[in-house]
Amino acid sequence: MVKPKIEIQNLTVSYGPIESLRKVSLDVSEFEILGVIGPASSGKTSLLRTLNRLNDENPLFRKQGRILLDGLDIYTKMDVPLLRKRIGMIFALPAPLPLSIFDNVAYGPRLHGIRSKRELEEIVERSLRAGFLWDEVKDRLDTPAMKLSGGQQQRLCIARSLAVEPEVILYDEPCSGLDPISTARVEEAMQQLKQKYTQILVTNNTKQAARVSDRTAFFLMGELVEIDRTQKMFTVPQDQRTEDYVSGRFG
Amino acid sequence: MNPRITQRIAFTFLFLSTLLILVPVFLILLMIFRDGFQALSWQFLTAYPRLGMRAGGIFPAIVGTVYLVAATLAFSLPVGILAAIYLSEYAKDNWFKRVIEVAIVNLAGVPSVVYGLFGLGLFVIFLKFGASILAGSLTLSIMSLPVIITASREALGTVPLSFREVSLALGATKWQTIRRAVLPNALPGMITGTILALSRAAGETAPILFTVAAFYLPRLPRSIFDQCMALPYHLYVISTQVPNVKLSIQYGTALVLILLVLAMNIVAIVIRAQFRKRKLW
């Protein structure tokens, strides 16, 4: 067993009176792709937003339990911006900033104090290559990122996350707005990134989890129903509810 | 009654009401242009008033109003924007924030003459600024702040949440996020709102009456501790306080004031249009 990169211990998350995760415990291994599936309001997105502490922005947010990154509690032992630098996030809708392609990718490095133009150029090229976008945009880095197609925008967002050299990448339904070809490109990028990054993919598309992830976790109404190797989850799940969901009987 | 007929009647009234708004605007502009246009000349704009303000130009009043607007901008823009950022981005939703919000709404409803008396009491007398550009522009600033803050908060509200989340998710602090992802996209809206508030302030008489405006001053102000003449007050003076002023001079002054305000509004509209063209979300 590879050492766990993230350990989630007995995590309960609520927003005011609404509980969205109940007593969830799971480990994420280094360099794996963990697929997270489940119907709407099963707590998938809550899990991601708790992992990089974006939920801190919500005044109603409360949590119990612990989340460890490399053995350290992210809620008590870590500086929030630094944590978010280590755990990057790709949102459901491609969200480029209204800046040029270059400035979008350079946004993160600049935040963290990199000023040298040459250094920024290196980072931008390296990140765009890693996000499989470089060849399509290398001649027009100065054009507005908003002019790219949806699929290109999403790969730009991946490249932008990579530019701050994270260790973990969270994807919140990254392909929900993309056509099948763009989706394939993004999935291809994720497969290549496996060598260096731990990835958690939340998706409404059960087949996508089957295609991309090493292990899959199934959530229902805020509870972790089952987590196992993807192949096993989709062929011989332990729980009847998992079987019903992955075979498309509800959800 | 036949619903089609009631609908026709309703449309007619709605349209007439809309038309009714245009009529006074059109008439005011027509009258002022007709009677004021002949007074307009290079000399009218650049000369000092003569013969007890019955002849000559209105140069010191124009300069005074420009100074007042500039000083008001310098005070109110930073304060207004910073307060708006605090209220929209930082303040927790508690009783303190609600008190401030209610105060801002009420401040916007205070009659301008009350601001004038307040400025007289606080800046002119208590703080010993005397009647001065400083006292007058501070008074105009306080009057403009509610509008600037409200417009700035609206501008901040139009910046999509995703910009903030993206920035935070890359490890930005809250201030870095505001500074780099939010503010550049809200600033044009803030500036537009501020200019519109200032164009209102430029035409106000009551707030400057006790705090800065001079009846007649044969020289330009030398510092912000000097009094100055101002267009709206000058217009009031030559219309009601000085007998036998030619109609063309009165209307000419009104025309210059209106053109100044119009020019400021056009600048605001151009900034907004430029921004809309650039904005792609």
Image: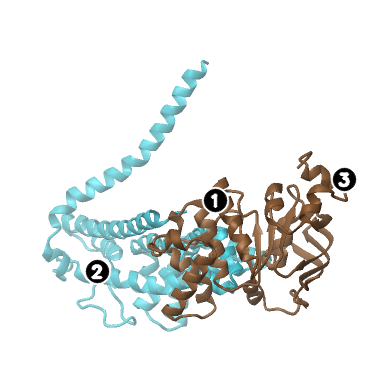
Please state if B156 lies on the left or on the right of B41 as rendered.
right
Query: Contact (CB < 8 A) between labels 1 and 2?
Result: no
Secondary element under disc 2, as helix, strand or loop, is: helix
- Of badges 2 and 3, the one in the foreground is 3
| Residue beneath the point at 28% across and 47% down | B28
Q: Which residue is mark 3?
A: A240
The answer to whether dots 2 and 3 both sit on one chain is no
Which amino acid type is shown beneath numbered disc 2?
Ala
| Residue beneath the point at 12% across and 64% down | B42
Q: Which residue is mark 1?
A: A182
Chain for mark 1? Answer: A
Query: Contact (CB < 8 A) between labels 1 and 3?
Result: no
Please state if A103 lies on the left or on the right of A177 as rendered.
left
Question: N-terminal of the two: label 1 or label 3?
Answer: 1
Mark 3: give few (<14), some (14-19) or many (20+) Cα within 10 Å: few
Q: Quadrant of residue B231?
A: bottom left
The answer to which of A180 and A86 lies nearer the viewer is A180
Res B61 label: 2
* x and y percentages locating residue A104 in the rendered image: 48, 66
The answer to which of B187 and B256 lies nearer the viewer is B187
Mark 2: give few (<14), some (14-19) or many (20+) Cα within 10 Å: many
